[in-house]
């Protein structure tokens, strides 16, 4: 299936999604959790034998032209001061929201993750938080997680997720190598923040921001769950002190299409929508 067809088909889903939102341009500012109940989750290492493994980028995206790149397990957008030569220590925050998808059944297990993060586009660390949506042994599986790659992934046991819930997440640099990773369920009005003891990195370059749907990795890239359509919005970042939507003139951004090793499209983002901070994702292939 060709990329132009995929992108044009994304707009078919606008009508499907429009009933879920009171405004076509949600989240002009970082999402607020004011009035939400703060919960403490049990932090459990992801069992890489039974869960969806590492969420890092393997290998790095390859550029097709100035505005597009491809990856074997990432799809979405990245932003940086310069996509060819991102400036270190320039990214201090990233925000985004999405909807817990209904995963289509499959004969074999399949996996996907929605997340926001800093780093990973062109370097060897990723500071990220998001949700996994898998089809395991005939059942859907949804859970929240975070990862300070190359450290292990951790599940947030006790963070509730249901199909259709609106999720917002953020990664914010707090200084001295410490990141604040937060995730909230806007539908259920619950929020949690990862303890700083888990979110310190001496190696993070803070050179790029990302909004990604991923096929996780465990002894190879895992089959991508059929999530149908995804909608990510409120995609904001603070780069060089400027808080703005992913598609703006203060920095560069690049779209990333997920492809198989032979170039077949697996998932692709639309162009940024009217607010410059939202886009659709379309599943195409495992």
Image (cartoon, rainbow, N blue to C red):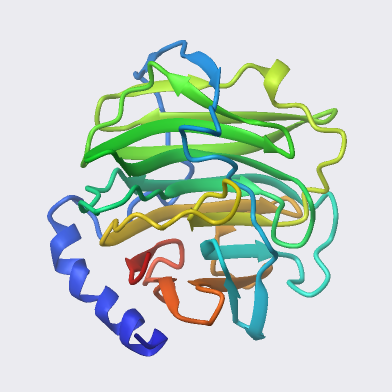
x, y percent for residue 107: 24, 53
Q: Nearer the viewer, residue 125 or 8?
A: 125
Q: Is residue 55 above or below residue 202?
A: below
x, y percent for residue 192: 47, 20
- Identified at 22% across, 48% down, the residue is 102
Screen quadrant of the C terminus: bottom left
* Quarter where residue 197 is shown: top right
* Quarter where residue 84 is shown: bottom right
Screen quadrant of the N terminus: bottom left
- Identified at 63% across, 16% down, the residue is 195
x, y percent for residue 60: 70, 65
* Quarter where residue 31 is shown: top left
- How many marks are shown on the rendered structure? 0
Q: Is residue 53 above or below residue 205?
A: above
Image side of residue 61 versus residue 32, left or right: right
- Identified at 48% across, 55% down, the residue is 215
Q: Is residue 165 visible?
A: no
Image side of residue 97 versus residue 164, left or right: right
Q: Nearer the viewer, residue 96 or 105?
A: 105
Q: Is residue 118 above or below residue 194?
A: below
x, y percent for residue 45: 58, 22
Q: Is residue 206 visible?
A: yes
Q: Is residue 221 above or below residue 84?
A: above
């Amino acid at each position: 299936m060709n990329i132009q067809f995929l992108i044009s088909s994304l707009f078919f889903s606008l009508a499907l999604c429009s009933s879920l939102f009171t405004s076509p341009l949600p989240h002009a500012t970082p999402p607020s959790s004011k009035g939400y109940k703060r919960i403490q989750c049990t932090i459990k290492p992801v069992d890489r034998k039974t869960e969806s493994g590492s969420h890092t980028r393997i290998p790095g995206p390859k550029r097709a032209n100035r505005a597009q790149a491809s990856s074997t397990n990432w799809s979405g957008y990245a932003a940086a001061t310069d996509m060819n030569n991102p400036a270190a220590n320039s990214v201090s925050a990233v925000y985004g929201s999405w909807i817990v998808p209904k995963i289509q059944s499959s004969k074999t297990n399949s996996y996907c993750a929605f997340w926001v993060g800093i780093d990973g586009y062109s370097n060897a660390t990723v500071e990220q938080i998001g949700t996994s949506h898998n089809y395991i042994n005939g059942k859907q599986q949804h859970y929240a997680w975070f990862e300070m790659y190359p450290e292990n992934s951790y599940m947030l046991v006790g963070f509730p997720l249901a199909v259709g819930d609106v999720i917002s997440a953020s990664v914010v640099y707090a200084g001295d190598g410490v990141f604040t990773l937060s995730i909230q369920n806007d539908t259920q009005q619950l929020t949690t923040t990862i303890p700083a003891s888990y979110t310190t990195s001496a190696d993070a370059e803070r050179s790029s921001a990302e909004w990604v749907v991923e096929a996780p990795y465990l002894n190879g890239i895992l089959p991508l769950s059929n999530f149908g359509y995804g909608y990510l919005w409120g995609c904001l970042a603070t780069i060089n002190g400027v808080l703005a939507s992913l598609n703006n003139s203060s920095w560069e951004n690049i779209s990333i299409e997920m492809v198989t090793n032979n170039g077949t499209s697996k998932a692709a983002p639309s162009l940024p929508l009217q607010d410059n901070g939202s886009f659709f994702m379309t599943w195409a292939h495992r």
